[in-house]
């Protein structure tokens, strides 16, 4: 189908995915292989939905891998392949004949990404990098090294972690860029720790202060990213007989030139400054009143009362 009828194919795909039966996936397989859509719609969303059922998605393989030749579907074939490989539903040997095709897609995507100054869809490439990492050979590791040059930090983080897991060298400057970014710092450290590579995390950012800055930034970015976060002070409270440390911030949002500010609280942290991770869950913003420098102590008290009330429910 082309022209005005082309969207009907995607509507049919939606219906088949909603059914989630062996018959619907067999029909889906036939449609994709023998009546492959030629015009794009939101096929990324469809790609994610196919793996809602790993067992049913598995029935599409290995034949569905032939769609690596389709520019319209190759990215979600890669994404689905990674998800099933990660779930042990398919084997790497099944994918190996398509490694060259995957590398070609990665190389073409890289050339496009390097031309962009602002990348807003970096997440689309993460499963591709994870899939390349699974091959763990000279060609795929070289491609992962090349992806370190991309400015998007989501892509950079995935490439760094994939290379380290594959016991490949990574330029310390690339690790520094991730640690320096408030949005990535805390989770990046945790990811390094999970693979036993936390010693590579830059010492400059290895402190409660820097980790709390990252923690409050992430908490404040739940809907809109703050335009500025300014450290105010530290507070020590005794909670259940234990003294604990909190870091207070002024969090600013800029909505088309109109600024609003709130008190941000990160913690609790141990009084042992070498323990850089939180020992509880009391991080957030005091939203009920806008920031007033004369009422920091009062707002902090009200925030902690809210947290206690929430925990008691």
Image (cartoon, rainbow, N blue to C red):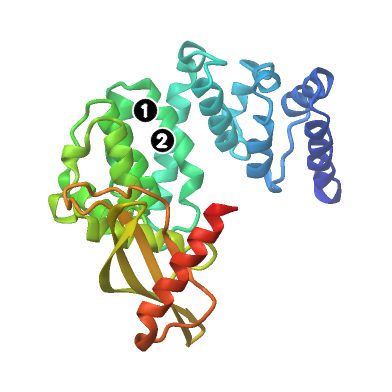
Provide residue 176's location: percent of width, then percent of height: 20, 52
Q: Would you place residue 210 above or below residue 75 in this image?
A: below
Provide residue 311's location: percent of width, then percent of height: 53, 53
Q: Would you place residue 245 above or below residue 88 in this image?
A: below
Q: Which residue is mark 2?
A: 129
**Is 68 placed left or right of 8 in the picture?**
left
Are the residues tagged 1 and 2 within 8 Å (C-beta)?
yes
Provide residue 12's location: percent of width, then percent of height: 84, 37
**Where's the N terminus, which quadrant?**
top right
Q: Would you place residue 233 above or below residue 107 in this image?
A: below
Provide residue 118's location: percent of width, then percent of height: 42, 63
**Is 157 placed left or right of 71 in the picture?**
left
- Asked which quadrant contains residue 58, the reply is top right
In the rendering, which numbered label is found on residue 133?
Answer: 1
Mark 1 element type: helix
Q: Mark 1 packing: few (<14 Cα in 10 Å), some, or many (20+)?
A: many
**Is 250 placed left or right of 40 in the picture?**
left
Looking at the image, which residue sits at the far front? 241
**Is 186 placed left or right of 307 in the picture?**
left
- Most foreground residue, 185 or 133: 185
């Amino acid at each position: 189908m082309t022209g005005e009828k082309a969207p009907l194919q995607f509507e049919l795909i939606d219906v088949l995915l909603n059914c989630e039966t062996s018959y619907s996936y067999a029909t889906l397989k036939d449609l994709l292989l023998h009546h492959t859509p030629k015009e794009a719609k939101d096929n990324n969303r469809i790609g994610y939905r196919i793996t809602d059922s790993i067992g049913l998605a598995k029935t599409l393989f290995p034949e569905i891998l032939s769609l690596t030749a389709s520019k319209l579907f190759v990215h979600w074939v890669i994404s689905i392949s990674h998800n099933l490989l990660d779930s042990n539903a398919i084997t790497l040997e099944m994918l190996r004949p398509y490694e060259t095709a995957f590398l070609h897609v990665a190389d073409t995507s890289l050339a496009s990404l390097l031309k962009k100054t602002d990348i807003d869809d970096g997440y689309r490439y993460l499963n591709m990098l994870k899939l390349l990492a699974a091959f763990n050979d000279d060609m795929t590791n070289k491609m992962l090294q090349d992806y370190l040059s991309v400015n998007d930090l989501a892509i950079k983080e995935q490439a760094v972690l994939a290379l380290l897991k594959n016991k490949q060298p990574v330029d310390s400057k690339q690790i520094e860029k991730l640690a320096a970014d408030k949005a990535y710092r805390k989770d990046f450290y945790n990811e390094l720790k999970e693979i036993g590579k936390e010693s590579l995390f830059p010492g400059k950012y290895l402190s409660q202060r820097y980790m709390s800055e990252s923690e409050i930034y992430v908490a404040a970015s739940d809907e809109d990213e703050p335009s500025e976060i300014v450290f105010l002070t530290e507070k020590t409270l005794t909670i259940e007989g234990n003294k604990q440390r909190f870091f207070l911030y002024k969090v600013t949002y800029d909505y088309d030139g109109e600024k609003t500010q709130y008190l941000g609280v990160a913690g609790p942290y141990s009084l042992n400054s070498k323990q850089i991770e939180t020992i509880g869950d009391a991080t957030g913003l005091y939203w009920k009143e806008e920031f007033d420098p004369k009422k920091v102590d009062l707002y902090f008290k009200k925030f902690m009362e809210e947290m206690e009330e929430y925990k008691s429910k």
